[in-house]
């Protein structure tokens, strides 16, 4: 392995020709032309203003848990390493807690519970950083991050100026936000503030969680810690740990189709797993569609479909991003052929 050359200027470090293997949860060994680890908003601005960054494309990386790196990146990678978390204020209705973008999401969730501030427990063990959470509006077991969001700070890459975004400006949707669309490649999130209502209600209806709580004798009036523990147990049982088996969580979004298409599909496939949406459309479980096509546990080269959750693609060791994409395309073809439904990748493909 070559040793990256490192230099020091204007309080920011640049590394050249740097392997991103440790910085993406698929473990793909692609290289960054330049990499800079930023620990503050000032360092972000300094890195962007540095002459060596001039004219380069930029890629902001947190934990790398929602990207598929298919090739070397010929620009500047900004590795988000801003740390810190605090209770910023409290009123009669809620606590407001802020975390810097580089904090590990799961550790932050555990910390809020330790402060006696419930509300994020359903989102335990989601890989990645706090700064990445709003980009795709992470969600699990009946809760989306957007429901606990107050505001965020983000630095505009072109100008180095910091902007504040409220929930409306973030335009959260299902695994979607402004930062995945118009804001993509334009902003880097530096901190996020959450609003945790004091009138806490458990979200424990999701079948897997209800089952796990019942098994532990906690089905009646579970507290936030019991839900946290149940979520951790369910995720550990179903989802591969990226440190052991490279993956980026769900590889596809659950597709949403219109009511007429759903009725036609259900007539043919009565067991199809579906969730009616408030707007009359119907969300389908992509994992079920993929499983039904026989892909669960199957491999193509070094890339494979996880044995316990067909929605997760894994690197069995030595896979490239291109191999994972080839597998994803085969799955998309089969699902469209059998069900007439298009699957859209959830992670960012680069
Ligand atoms: N299913 C199968 N076979 C499979 C996988 C799933 O038949 O291989 C069926 C299940 O039996 C169940 C349904 O599909 O009836 C849904 O499965 P599951 O409860 O595991 O959830 P999901 O829809 O596959 C979504 C999120 C996950 C999140 C879980 C729990 C998306 C794209 N994925 O998965 O999020 O943890 O719900 O809320 O919305 C992620 O985004 O990376 C992620 C892991």
Image (spheres, grey):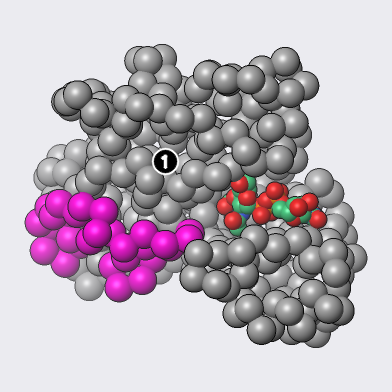
Image coordinates of residue 339 in percent, x first then y, are 78, 79
Vertical placement of residue 13 versus 66, above or below: above
The quarter of the picture where residue 297 lies is: bottom right
Q: Residue at x 77, y 21 (%)?
A: 215
**CA neighbours of label 1 inside 10 A, class few (<14), some (14 to 19), many (20+):** many
Q: Does 64 sit left or right of 333 as displayed?
A: left
Residue 128 highlighted magenta (yes or no): no
Q: What element does badge 1 sit on?
A: loop
Q: Which residue is at the front of the view, 139 or 26?
A: 139
Q: Tell me: is circle 1 under 8 Å from ligand 1.
A: no
266 vs 247, nearest the viewer: 266
Give me the residue at 44% from left, 57% from top: 136
240 on left or right of 49: right
In the picture, measured across the screen, residue 336 lies left or right of residue 106, that is right
Residue drawn at (62%, 38%) of the image: 205
Q: Does 180 appear above or below 249?
A: below
Q: Is residue 59 above or below residue 64?
A: below
| Membership of 166 in magenta stretch | yes
Query: Which of the pair 169/207 is nearer the observer?
Result: 207
Residue at 37%, 49% (x, y): give it.
146
Residue 113 placement (x, y as % from top left): 42, 20
Magenta span covers which residues? 155-183
**Residue 96, image x, y percentages:** 24, 30
Q: Which residue in the structure is indicated by mark 1?
A: 129
Q: Is residue 170 visible?
A: yes
């Amino acid at each position: 392995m070559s040793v990256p050359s490192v230099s020091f200027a204007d309080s920011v470090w640049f590394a050249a020709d740097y392997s991103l293997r440790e910085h993406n949860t698929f473990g793909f060994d692609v290289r960054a032309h330049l990499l800079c680890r930023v620990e503050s908003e000032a360092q972000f601005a300094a890195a962007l203003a540095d002459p060596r960054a001039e004219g380069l494309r930029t890629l902001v990386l947190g934990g790398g848990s929602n990207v598929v790196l298919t090739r070397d990146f010929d620009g500047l990678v900004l590795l988000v390493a801003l740390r810190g978390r605090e209770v910023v204020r409290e009123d009669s209705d809620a606590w407001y807690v802020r975390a810097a973008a580089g904090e590990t999401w799961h550790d932050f969730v555990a910390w809020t519970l330790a402060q006696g501030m419930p509300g994020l427990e359903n989102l335990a063990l989601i890989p990645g950083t706090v700064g990445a959470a709003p980009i795709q509006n992470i969600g699990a077991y009946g809760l989306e991050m957007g429901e606990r969001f107050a505001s965020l700070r983000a630095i505009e890459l072109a100008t180095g100026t910091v902007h504040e975004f409220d929930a409306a400006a973030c335009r959260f949707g299902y695994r979607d936000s402004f930062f995945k669309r118009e804001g993509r490649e334009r902003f880097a999130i530096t901190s996020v503030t959450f609003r945790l209502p004091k009138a806490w209600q458990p979200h424990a209806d999701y079948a897997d969680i209800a089952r796990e709580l019942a098994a532990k004798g906690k089905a009646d009036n579970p507290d936030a810690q019991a839900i946290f523990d149940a979520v951790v147990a369910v995720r550990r049982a179903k989802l591969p740990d990226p440190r052991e088996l490279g993956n980026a969580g769900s590889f596809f979004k659950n597709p949403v189709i219109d009511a007429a298409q759903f009725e036609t599909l259900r007539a043919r496939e009565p067991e199809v797993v579906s969730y009616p949406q408030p707007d009359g459309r119907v969300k389908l479980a992509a994992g079920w569609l993929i499983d039904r096509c026989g892909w669960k546990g199957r491999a193509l080269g070094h890339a494979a479909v996880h044995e316990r959750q067909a929605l997760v693609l894994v690197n069995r060791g030595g896979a490239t991003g291109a191999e994972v994409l080839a597998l994803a395309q085969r799955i998309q073809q089969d699902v469209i052929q059998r069900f007439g439904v298009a699957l859209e990748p959830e992670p960012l493909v680069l």
